[in-house]
């Protein structure tokens, strides 16, 4: 019995369990209902949060040891209230002045309306004839309807007009009806002001409570709150500047062409432009009506409409895309839908809050997994990464669009970066979906990728191989996808100056492998997408070793497990190296570099012990910890280098060598973090990113390099972080008495990476 009783609630729970989609829909419906029913409190609170995003940086700047935060908040709020009060007085005076002048425009308005009536609605014109025909048709239909009811008396067919006179309102009711439209916005503003004061004062406490409410993952919650605050604050600040510029330009232009109340219409335009897309057009209605009223002709109206359209086109097409950038990150259709939704939910205030609320929802969807669909539905960033987008275009047979995507990536980056980060991963997706794909889809992918590589080869031809360059043969191990990846390998190697060729997988057949052109070939790279390529690889390696015993063979198994990439697995397969990435395969296929000579940049001089090393070593250790990297290195302008301790010594020397080379290339005009994409500098397959060491004057003192195992390129945030660490290292070197910033004479006198005479 106890067992049965214990099992009974479980069965009951299974009976009432709802599908996840239905539960999500019910949750969204409840949230929308709560937003609608609680708008009396939520609207002023949302307005207060919106203003807090804009005013909090100002309060933070005013905060001083002798000025408490509450006093800074009071000073900012008093200034804002004073500005709004002055603006209200100005708008009221302008409206009163226009009200006094309107009777003087009555004759002009009557004249224009009379002209329009004579031109458009005159009974003698075409519209008048059409109106008479419509009247005759209506009378005939009415007569036919009455004839179909012969038994009903005419008196009963004619409805009796009834008029209901409303009960006269009491004086108090009439006063309330007049005051309610004015008092309601004022009450909302007052409640929002109270909320704003306490939000600004208790910002830290509210932030902690929000993070606690967001969940146990403090890192994700902190990142979400920080990104939302940063993006919303930047968006609102930029929007305020753009709207003020629009209002100022509109007011100035209307004043120059002679429209009365130009300053009032400029202020109205700056306010209405907070409404997405249509605010500027709505702001043109009042000045257009005023131009219609004051001018006897039509030129003033045309000038007014032209001015508004020119400002809207200029701002929407050039100013906003340039200034906003990715601060909002909202898709255009999503922005329109969001504006319509919040306007229907909260009225005009919803239009002002639509964009900031949508930005917060997108950020929440980016950092919180249950809300990931919000980013996909509302965000402007692509829902697919670059390899998936390319693979989808190939699946759909859109070869032209796939080529366009590839060319755009190559123009913004490099051919090697596209092949490494997009081309090979797209083929990996195709190979993993090979069993589930139909014959037509497989043909589309293979034929489309072949056409894409052909176009890239024609648009970006590889440089001619130099005399004595390494000869590398890239061959697909089994399938057409293997052959396409081999072609990508050949293009990557050819871009480095190697004499690289590619052959299809048919060249490794039992009858064809004996006739492979191996004369003068230094290395063979075998490309394979098969997750278990051991059998084919052993067979091919035995045949190749039989023909050329000293031939270097590299295997690139793109989908193989990590266990296959060990030295023991390579020896068992009969290959010299098993590569995991395109850069690693290209690097291992090339002959080893020459030994370093004295004074060469390949042999950087270490810092040695002393105050300078003691000052820079903590920055290197912090760089390794922050990026979770195996090694980091820095090089000063005089060629002295330092690698992070505790790692592989050979890897540290290679990283120091690259840092010295980068330090020699930095000058005052090239102080931006750049990726090192050369396969020879890939540090055994690691991705290297470098930033200049800047002193307090902004001049470079060297370079900071970090080598990561991540195959993707560094994000903008990671580049900014590395630049921040590099600036810290530059200031530490300056304080510890490091070498001065290199000038033109120093750069000319010192060879790259050569130690200074000191």
Image (tube, rainbow, N blue to C red):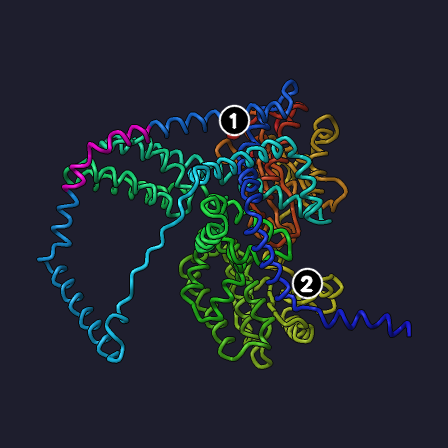
Residue bounds of the magenta highlight: 94-111
Q: Which residue is mark 1?
A: 743
Mark 2 or mark 1: whose residue is earlier in sequence: 2
Q: CA distance from mark 2 to mark 1?
A: 46 Å
Residue 530 vs 321, above or below: the answer is below
Q: Secondary structure at mark 1?
A: loop
Q: Position of residue 431 (x, y in %)?
A: 58, 71
Q: Nearer the viewer, residue 529 or 542?
A: 529
Q: Secondary structure at mark 2?
A: loop
Question: Main SS of the magenta segment?
Answer: helix
Q: Position of residue 277 (x, y in %)?
A: 39, 48
Residue sitting at 45 percent across and 59 percent down?
A: 405
Q: Position of residue 623 (x, y in %)?
A: 68, 40
Label disc, if present, on residue 71 of the rendered structure: none
Residue 15 vs 723, above or below: the answer is below
Is 583 displayed left or right of 345 in the figure?
right
Q: Which residue is mark 2?
A: 576
Residue sitting at 25 percent across and 75 percent down?
A: 153
Q: Tell me the mark number nearer the camera, choosing from 2 and 1.
A: 1
Q: Is residue 653 visible?
A: no
CA neighbours of label 1 inside 10 A, class few (<14), some (14 to 19), many (20+): few
Q: Nearer the viewer, residue 37 or 84?
A: 37
């Amino acid at each position: 019995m106890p067992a049965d009783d214990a099992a009974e609630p479980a069965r009951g729970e299974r009976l009432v369990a709802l599908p996840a989609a239905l539960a999500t829909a019910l949750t969204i419906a409840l949230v929308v209902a709560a937003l609608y029913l609680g708008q009396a409190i939520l609207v002023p609170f949302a307005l207060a949060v919106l203003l807090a995003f804009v005013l909090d940086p100002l309060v933070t700047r005013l905060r001083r040891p002798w000025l408490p935060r509450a006093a800074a908040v009071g000073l900012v709020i008093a200034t804002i209230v004073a500005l709004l009060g002055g603006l209200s007085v100005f708008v009221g005076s302008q409206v009163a002045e226009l009200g006094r002048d309107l009777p003087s425009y009555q004759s002009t308005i009557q004249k224009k309306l009379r002209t329009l009536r004579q031109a458009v609605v005159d009974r003698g014109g075409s519209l008048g004839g059409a109106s008479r025909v419509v009247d005759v048709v209506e009378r005939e239909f009415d007569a036919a309807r009455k004839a179909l009811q012969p038994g009903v008396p005419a008196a009963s067919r004619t409805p009796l007009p009834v008029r209901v006179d409303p009960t006269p309102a009491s004086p108090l009711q009439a006063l309330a009806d007049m005051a309610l439209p004015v008092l309601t916005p004022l009450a909302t503003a007052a409640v929002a002001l109270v909320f704003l004061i306490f939000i600004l004062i208790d910002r830290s406490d509210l932030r902690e409570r929000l993070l606690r409410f967001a969940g146990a993952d403090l890192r994700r919650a902190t990142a979400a709150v920080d990104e939302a605050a940063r993006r919303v604050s930047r968006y609102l600040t930029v929007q305020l500047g753009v709207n003020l510029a629009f209002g100022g330009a509109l007011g100035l232009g209307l004043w120059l062409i002679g429209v009365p109340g130009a300053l009032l219409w400029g202020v109205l335009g700056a306010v209405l432009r907070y409404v997405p897309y249509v605010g500027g057009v709505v702001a043109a209605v009042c000045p257009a009506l005023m131009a219609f009223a004051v001018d006897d002709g039509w030129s003033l109206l045309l000038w007014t409409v032209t001015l508004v359209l020119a400002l809207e086109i200029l701002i929407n097409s050039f100013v906003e895309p340039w200034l906003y950038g990715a601060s909002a990150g909202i898709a255009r259709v999503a922005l329109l839908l969001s504006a319509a939704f919040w306007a229907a939910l909260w009225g005009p205030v919803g239009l002002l809050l639509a964009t900031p609320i949508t930005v917060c929802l997108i950020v929440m969807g980016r950092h919180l997994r249950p809300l990931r669909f919000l980013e996909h539905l509302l965000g402007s960033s692509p829902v697919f990464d670059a390899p998936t987008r390319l693979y989808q275009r190939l699946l759909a047979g859109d070869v032209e669009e796939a080529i366009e995507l590839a060319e755009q990536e190559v123009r913004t980056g490099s051919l090697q970066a596209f092949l490494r980060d997009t081309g090979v991963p797209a083929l990996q997706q195709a190979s993993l979906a090979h069993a589930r794909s139909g014959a037509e889809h497989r043909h589309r992918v293979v034929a489309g990728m072949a056409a894409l590589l052909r176009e890239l080869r024609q648009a970006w031809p590889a440089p001619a191989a130099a005399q004595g360059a390494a000869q590398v043969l890239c061959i697909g191990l089994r399938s057409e996808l293997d052959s396409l990846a081999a072609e990508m390998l050949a293009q990557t190697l050819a871009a480095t100056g190697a004499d690289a060729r590619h052959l299809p997988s048919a060249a490794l057949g039992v009858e064809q492998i004996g006739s492979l052109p191996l004369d003068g070939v230094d290395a063979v790279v075998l490309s394979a997408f098969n997750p278990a390529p051991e059998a084919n690889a052993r067979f091919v390696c035995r045949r190749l070793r039989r023909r050329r015993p000293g031939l270097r063979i590299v295997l690139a198994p793109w989908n193989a497990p990590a266990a296959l990439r060990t030295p023991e697995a390579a020896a068992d397969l009969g290959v010299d190296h098993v590569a995991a990435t395109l850069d690693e395969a290209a690097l291992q296929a090339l002959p080893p570099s020459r030994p370093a000579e004295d004074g060469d940049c390949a042999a950087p001089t270490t810092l040695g012990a002393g105050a300078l090393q003691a000052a820079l070593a903590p920055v290197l250790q912090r760089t390794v910890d922050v990026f979770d990297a195996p090694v980091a290195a820095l090089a000063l302008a005089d060629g002295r280098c330092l690698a992070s301790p505790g790692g592989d010594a050979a890897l540290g020397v290679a990283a120091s060598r690259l840092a010295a080379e980068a330090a020699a290339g930095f000058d005052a005009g090239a102080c931006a973090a750049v990726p090192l994409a050369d396969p020879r500098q890939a540090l055994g397959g690691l991705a290297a990113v470098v930033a200049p060491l800047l002193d307090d004057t902004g001049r470079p003192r060297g370079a900071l390099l970090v080598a990561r195992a991540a195959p993707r390129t560094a994000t903008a945030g990671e580049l900014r972080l590395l630049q921040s660490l590099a600036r810290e290292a530059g200031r530490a070197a300056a304080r510890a008495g490091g070498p001065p910033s290199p000038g033109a004479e120093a750069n000319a006198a010192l060879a790259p990476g050569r130690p200074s005479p000191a």
